[in-house]
C-alpha cells in the first residue's frame, strides 16, 4: 500500500515569491493534516481536513497561507508571498479520522526562502 | 505551541545499550504517542498509550505514563544503529480534542555501532 505522497521534496525560492505543496493521502483516509516543522522543533499543526472540509485551521496564518482539499482526496498548501521565516519542512499526514487512529506522515517538503 | 518537552535533547549510546527518553507535558491528556523521525524523513508512529494506562510494550519499546507527574518515558532496549533518529512525544489534550496532536521538540538519539 502506498504511503502519503508529497511533492516536491525540496523547494528553494526567493522571498515574496509564491509556492505550493501537494499531498496525496493514503487511500481511504478521510482526515488530512498539514504540519510545519521548524529546524530542531517538533511539527506544529497548520490545518486539519475532514474530507473536503477544513475543520481546524486556527494555526494557519491566513494572510499568506491557503489550503484546499477539493473532492476530499489530495490537498494543496500555498504560501503567497513567502517570507524568510517560512523556511521549514512542511509535512502532510493522513488518518482514518477517529481520535486514536494513527497519523501517517509523508516525507515532507523542505522549503528554503532566500 | 509545543506542549511536550523531551529530555534529554540529545543522547549518544553504544549499540546494544538501552536508551531512555523522557517527555513532560502541561495539560490533561487523552493519549500520549511516541513518533520516530529519521533524518530527512517523515514521522513514523511507534506506540500510543492511553491516559488510563501506566505501561505499554511493543517489541523492544517500553513506554510508561505517569499522569500525576504529567510525564512519560520511552525505553528502547538493546539498541541498534538503525534506531538512530529523533524521537518525539505527542499529546492530544482534553481541551483541544483528540484530533489535535501537540508535539515536543524531540530527543536526538545516536546509536554508535
Image (tube, rainbow, N blue to C red):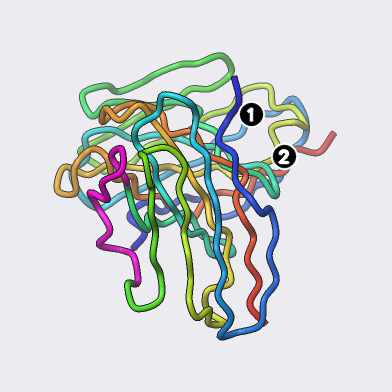
Crowdedness near tag 2: few (<14), some (14–19) or many (≥20) residues, C-alpha within 10 Å: some
Mark 2 vs mark 1, CA separation in Å = 8 Å
Residue at left 33%, top 45%? B101
Q: Is residue A72 left or right of residue B108?
A: left
Dot 2 or dot 1: first in sequence order is 2
Foreground pick, B93 / B18? B93
Q: Are marks 2 and 1 in contact (CB under 8 Å)?
A: yes
Q: Is residue A57 magenta?
A: yes
User: Residue lying farthest left?
Assistant: B95
Quarter of the image where one finds residue B87: top right
Residue A19's disc number: none
Quarter of the image where one finds residue B32: top left
- x, y percent for residue A28: 41, 24
- x, y percent for residue B72: 37, 37
- x, y percent for residue B97: 18, 42
> In the structure shown, which secondary structural element does the residue marked by tag 2 occupy?
strand
Q: Is residue A54 magenta?
A: yes
Residue B13's disc number: 2
Circle 1 residue? B18
Q: Chain of mark 2?
A: B
Residue at left 63%, top 77%? A113
Foreground pick, A4 / B83? A4
Say which quadrant the C terminus of chain A sits in: bottom right
Residue at left 56%, top 85%? A16
Say which quadrant the N terminus of chain A sits in: top right
Q: Are marks 2 and 1 on the same chain?
A: yes
> In the structure shown, which secondary structural element does the residue marked by tag 1 occupy?
loop
Amino acid at each position: 500500500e502506498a504511503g502519503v505522497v508529497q511533492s516536491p521534496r525540496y523547494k528553494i525560492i526567493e522571498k515574496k515569491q509564491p509556492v505550493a505543496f501537494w499531498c496525496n493521502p493514503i487511500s481511504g483516509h478521510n482526515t488530512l493534516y498539514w504540519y510545519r516543522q521548524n529546524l530542531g522543533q517538533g511539527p506544529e499543526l497548520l490545518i486539519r481536513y475532514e474530507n473536503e472540509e477544513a475543520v481546524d485551521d486556527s494555526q494557519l496564518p491566513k494572510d499568506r497561507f491557503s489550503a484546499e482539499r477539493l473532492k476530499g482526496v489530495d490537498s494543496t498548501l500555498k504560501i503567497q508571498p513567502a517570507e524568510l521565516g517560512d523556511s521549514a519542512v512542511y509535512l502532510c499526514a493522513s488518518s482514518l479520522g477517529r481520535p486514536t487512529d494513527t497519523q501517517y506522515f509523508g516525507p515532507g517538503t523542505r522549503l528554503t526562502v532566500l | 505551541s509545543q506542549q511536550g518537552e523531551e529530555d534529554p535533547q540529545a543522547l549518544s549510546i553504544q549499540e546494544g545499550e538501552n536508551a531512555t527518553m523522557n517527555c513532560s507535558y502541561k495539560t490533561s491528556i487523552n493519549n500520549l504517542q511516541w513518533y520516530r523521525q529519521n533524518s530527512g524523513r517523515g514521522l513514523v508512529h511507534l506506540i500510543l498509550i492511553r491516559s488510563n494506562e501506566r505501561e505499554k510494550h511493543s517489541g523492544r519499546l517500553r513506554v510508561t505514563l505517569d499522569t500525576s507527574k504529567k510525564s512519560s518515558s520511552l525505553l528502547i532496549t538493546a539498541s541498534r544503529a538503525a534506531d538512530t533518529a529523533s524521537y518525539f512525544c505527542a499529546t492530544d489534550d482534553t481541551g483541544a480534542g483528540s484530533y489535535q496532536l501537540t508535539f515536543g521538540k524531540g530527543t536526538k538519539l545516536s546509536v554508535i555501532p
